[in-house]
Amino acid sequence: MRVIIQRVKSSQVEVDRRVIGKIGRGLNLLVGIADTDTEAELDWMVRKCLDLRLFPDETTGNDRWEKSVQDIGGELLVVSQFTLYGDCRKGRRPSFSQSAAPEYARALYQLFVDKLRMSGLRVETGEFGAMMEVCIENDGPVTLLLEKEASVR
């Protein structure tokens, strides 16, 4: 499983020129599911996204990242992105053979969103499988790639 995690001041996603998800301060999560991913990888990723300290503690005046998205009561925008598993090593067109099949990816993506919602934070989403326009106002910018290799399924 791969997640591009971005600290944002705001973020929104549109489908057919209609805003379907919008957040203020928090994290934008671009989520790629591999064909070998299981709920174990998903659980690790949920914990990591919620617990990573990516926000400064504004009460101390220190720029050190001391707070998680949970600590600040931030928001999450979760967008599926199978292209995170694009393999560009051969030829001029990416191969997506490591990406999960759409039905399997949709189920794991929805489970990922459901588990994030259990945190009590506001969670908005894109539309799985749709062509989307994502507007991201990066804060920092802070952008990290989280990756959890699947154990044998």
Image (tube, helix red, strand yellow):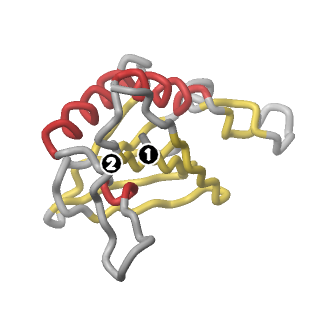
**Chain-order first, disc 1 or disc 2:** 1
Q: Any mark on residue 79, and which?
A: 2
Q: Position of residue 151 (x, y in %)?
A: 44, 27
What amino acid type should be assigned to the residue bearing mark 1?
Leu
Q: Residues within 10 Å of mark 2 (few under 14, many from 20)?
A: many
Callout 1: SS: strand
Q: Nearer the viewer, residue 89 or 70?
A: 89
- Do residues under tags 1 and 2 come within 8 Å of each other at their CB atoms? yes
Q: Nearer the viewer, residue 40 or 107?
A: 40
Quarter of the image with the N terminus is top left
Quarter of the image with the C terminus is top left
Q: Any mark on residue 68, and which?
A: none
Q: Which quarter of the figure has residue 61? A: top right
In the image, is residue 49 above or below residue 101? above
Please tell me which residue is depicted at 39% across the width and 27% down the height of the picture: 152
Q: Position of residue 63 (x, y in %)?
A: 82, 45
Disc 1 to disc 2, how far (Cα)? Answer: 6 Å
**Residue at image mark 1:** 29
